[in-house]
Image (tube, rainbow, N blue to C red):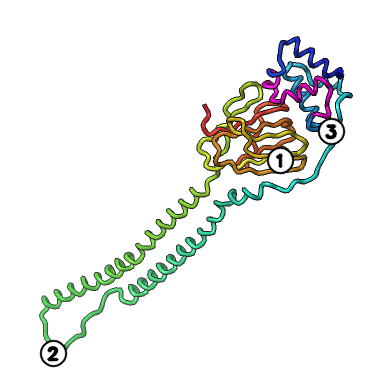
Amino acid sequence: MSELGEFLRTKREEQDISIERLQEMTKIQKRYLAAIEEGRYDSLPGAFYTRAFVKSYAEALRLNPEDVFETYGSELPQPKQQTTDLPSRAEKSKPKVQKNRGRKPTVLPALLGILFLLVVAAGIYLVVQETDQGNPEGSEPDDDPAIEMDSNEEAGENESESEEGRDVPEQEKDEGKAEEEPDSGDSTEQNSSAGEEEEETEEAVQPEFVETTQGNRSVFDVSGAEEMIIELELTGDAWLAVEDEEGSSLEDVSGLQAGDTVEMDLSGEDYVKINIGSSPNVIVRVNGEEVEYPIDSVHQHLIFDKQPQ
């Protein structure tokens, strides 16, 4: 048994904590916890996870991990940086993120239709104006020298002709307005159509932080979100697991390494938990927006719940 393992086992027993209880506290399998206490580091997943597990073990016992590493760190294997790229699993779900963008080009035909109607209306208006200017007073009857009329009859006819002359431009103007009115209706329909396009391209619902429980379990409210695209980007080595409310795995992310990025379409899930063994080395994005860690802890659980209590 190593000195580090003996030290941790002694502290655990002093606090009367069983290996099964420690497994629940750290979310680390008890066979790995037993391997740490017995100094069998080659039984652990790797050098990086060995240090991460020891740190979680120490934190669960309320010990300072830095002091533990300073005293017993020489026993632990040193992690190696790996930058080999994995084939991206994000390609299978990326097309769903772009589904709203394909509708934007439909706005251009609508604008062209509005412009065409405006040109037609302007042409009609100019024709009506030219007609009004060419005959502003109306036509007058030809004088017939063979017919004699008294002054009263001439005055009556002049008044009648004057009224008819005034009616012509007004009727023509009314016709011009009648031609222009359909353009207003079409513009209203086009504006309504443009409004519907804008509603369809509204941004996806973003997670809202609710609370942190049990020390490192942070809950986010994603109720109302029709789609939930989760992206994980590793800037360093980190242990990851993506599970549902029952603890069943939703995505296999065990093979991810530093420099990898994976995108998962989990829109059909009501509850998603991401178990992160080294939060400083993992960037989490939901629907394209980066999620800030609510607490400062290496080992964290991020829970995205569509029906938070």
Is the residue 278 above or below the residue 105 in the image? above
Query: Looking at the image, is 121 positioned above or below residue 247?
Result: below
User: Residue drawn at (36%, 63%), measured in percent from left and top?
Assistant: 182
Label of residue 79 in the image: 3
Query: Which segment did they paint magenta?
Result: 21-43
Residue at 21 percent across and 70 percent down: it is: 163
Secondary structure of the residue carrying numbered label 2: loop
Distance from label 1 to label 3 (Cα)? 19 Å
Q: Which mark is residue 130?
A: none
Residue 172 is situated, as x and y percent measured from the top left of the image, at 30, 70
Q: Amino acid at mark 1?
A: Glu
Mark linked to residue 233: 1
Mark 2 vs mark 3: give the one in front.
Answer: 3
Q: Is residue 6 left or right of residue 30?
A: right
Q: Does the residue at mark 2 contact the one at mark 1 (Cβ under 8 Å)?
A: no
The residue that label 2 is drawn on is 146
**Tag 1's secondary structure?**
strand
- The secondary structure that most of the magenta stretch takes on is helix
